[in-house]
Amino acid sequence: MGREAICTCDWAGEITEVKALLETSEIILRGGIRKRIPFNELQQVKVISDRLCFQAGREPVELILGSPAAERWAATIASPPPSLARKLGITSATRVRTIGNIDDEILNAALAEAAQHTARNADIIVALVGTPESLQAVLKQAMKQLMSGIPIWIVYAKGPGHPLNETAIRTLLRSNGMMDTKVASVSAKLTALRFNLRKSE
């Protein structure tokens, strides 16, 4: 999840307070100025005193974030975004169990970086679900591994109008002793929540 700040924004001479969000691949401004600026459209990114300065198209922009935050935001913008495999915690040493018909090209490319695909001795589970029934089935199939501490990524469709949403997923998994610990955008159509066994108090 991205960082955020309430700050003053000077957008080509228009000065107002905004809520600025630093996401994986874009800056989002809300409030007096509403903009989404992908990192690849930012030019001349630099820090001047307590300000993050850049060009958005031909328009100069300054966000008064404070010196430490401005430096961190500039460094994040300059760094390449993490790969999906990295966001999911998949490396060349990871053993992955997959559940469901995974036909998304981007997700399959990330899964291909794993050392092995196996239902036994997995380090992580990746499950694609589309309905409450398929989510229930995944829990039934994976419960033994989940209770032993293996994390699971629940991958589902983005946006409204689908049979399964974030709230329903969180409600069911939490009622089964799991806690959501991460979120990751998978592709234009898919997003994912990671769950781990809830730690004992």
Image (cartoon, helix red, strand yellow):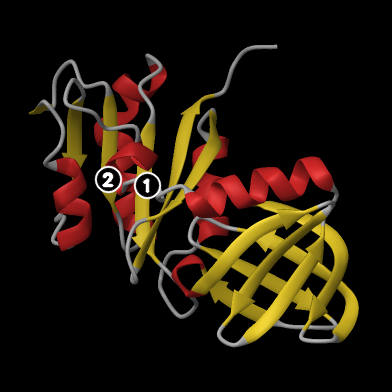
47 or 68: nearer the eye?
Answer: 47
> Residue visible at 74% across and 64% down?
20
123 or 106: nearer the eye?
Answer: 106
* Residue 181 shows in this picture: yes
Tag 1–tag 2 contact (CB < 8 Å): yes
Please state which amino acid type lies under the numbered disc 1: Ile
Tell me the CA gap for discs 1 and 2: 5 Å
The residue pinned by badge 2 equals 127
Quarter of the figure that contains the C terminus = top right
x and y percentages locating residue 2 in the rendered image: 61, 51
Q: Residues within 10 Å of mark 1 (few under 14, many from 20)?
A: many
Quarter of the rendering containing residue 179: top right
40 or 88: nearer the eye?
Answer: 40
The residue pinned by badge 1 equals 154
x and y percentages locating residue 85 in the rendered image: 28, 41
Disc on the earlier residue, 1 or 2: 2
